[in-house]
Image: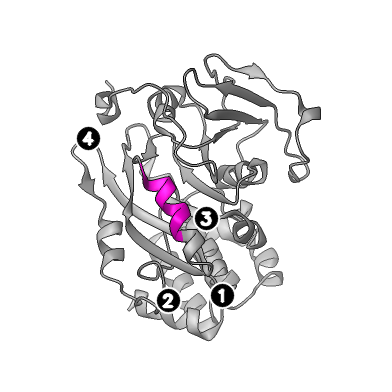
Amino acid sequence: MRGPMSVINRPAPAVVETDEVTVVVATRNRPDRLRETVPHHRAPTIIVDNGSDEPLDVPGAHDADLADEEDTGLPAGVVPSPVVAESAGSQRRVDVVRLEENIGAAARNTGVLWARTPFVAFADDDSYWEAGSLARAVEILRSHPKAALLTGRVLIGPEARPDPVSDYMATAPIGTPPGAAGPSVLGFLSCAVVVRREAFLKAGGFLPQLFVYGEEALLAMDLAAAGHELSYVPELTVRHFPEPAGRDNRARARREARNRALTAVLRRPPAVIARVLSEVGRTCPAALADLASDLPWALRNRRPLPAAIESHLRRLES
């Protein structure tokens, strides 16, 4: 039985509202979701097929000629096979980039590398940005040159319930700098951000070693450490229609705990690392075992955060 996504009205393909943003969607084995959400994307769209068991079928698509594309700068080992679909009655372009294997959240990096716009909006295969949000995000980023990331308000399901994460961000727990686009954030939901492409790539994007779950925290830290503003802007709205059935919540909790510990080792001071490792060891010992093989690499690549960013994190954790 289908979840709440089945109640979405399927509109005609959306007309582009801005050509300065590319929507990047990473997906795996969920073509039905894409068929319901992609028509809502109102900007050029790149779908990264993250090693699906069956190649993603995009109706009306045709193979693109790689020789005609710019060098994407894709990392070694990533073999894209682009497909281009032009939506009838729309100026929007849809590219499908196929990856040979599932690389987790880092698949979004591939989409950003493929994009040729100054800004990138992320969406999941079960989400989309409401009309007007992408064009407004461009206006805000153009008028706030220090901003590298805007995160919008998330409304869940057909009843449009506010996501608790959005409600919390609205309280501005770490304040709002003068002249900023909105309250500062040091975390976000991946399906609800628009980023400045250059800043995202310079920060390294989503760390492949984290794979999935909790990958946003490290990127937020690194963007802030580079001097960028990350802001919550509630006038930018995302509709999200999650369907949790079939997911292994215990496996997810284990991965989240492992990633929280790895992120602490990479960026946090020794006292915080000790606390996080103790908490993870007490609540999910298997996650520490998962972390063991990555510890030598993490210690070699430690880059502690500036004091001001660490102070903001302490405030959020208090």
Tell me which label, 4 or 2, sits earlier in the chain.
4
Tell me which label, 1 or 3, sits earlier in the chain.
3
**Based on the displayed image, in which of its 4 quarters is residue 197 positioned?**
bottom right
Q: Which residue is labeled 1 in the image? A: 227
Dot 2: what SS? helix
- The residue mark sitting in front, 1 or 2, is 1
Dot 4: what SS? loop
Q: Residue at image x 33%, y 38%? A: 242
On screen, residue 248 versus residue 27, left or right, reads left
Q: Which residue is labeled 3 in the image? A: 195
Tell me which label, 1 or 2, sits earlier in the chain.
1
Residue at the farthest left position: 159
Q: Quadrant of the C terminus?
A: bottom left
Q: Which residue is labeled 2 in the image? A: 313
Query: Cα distance, mark 1 to mark 4?
Result: 38 Å
Q: Residue at image x 63%, y 63%? A: 203
- The residue mark sitting in front, 2 or 3, is 3
Is any atom of residue 155 visible in this view? yes
Query: Cα distance, mark 3 to mark 4?
Result: 27 Å
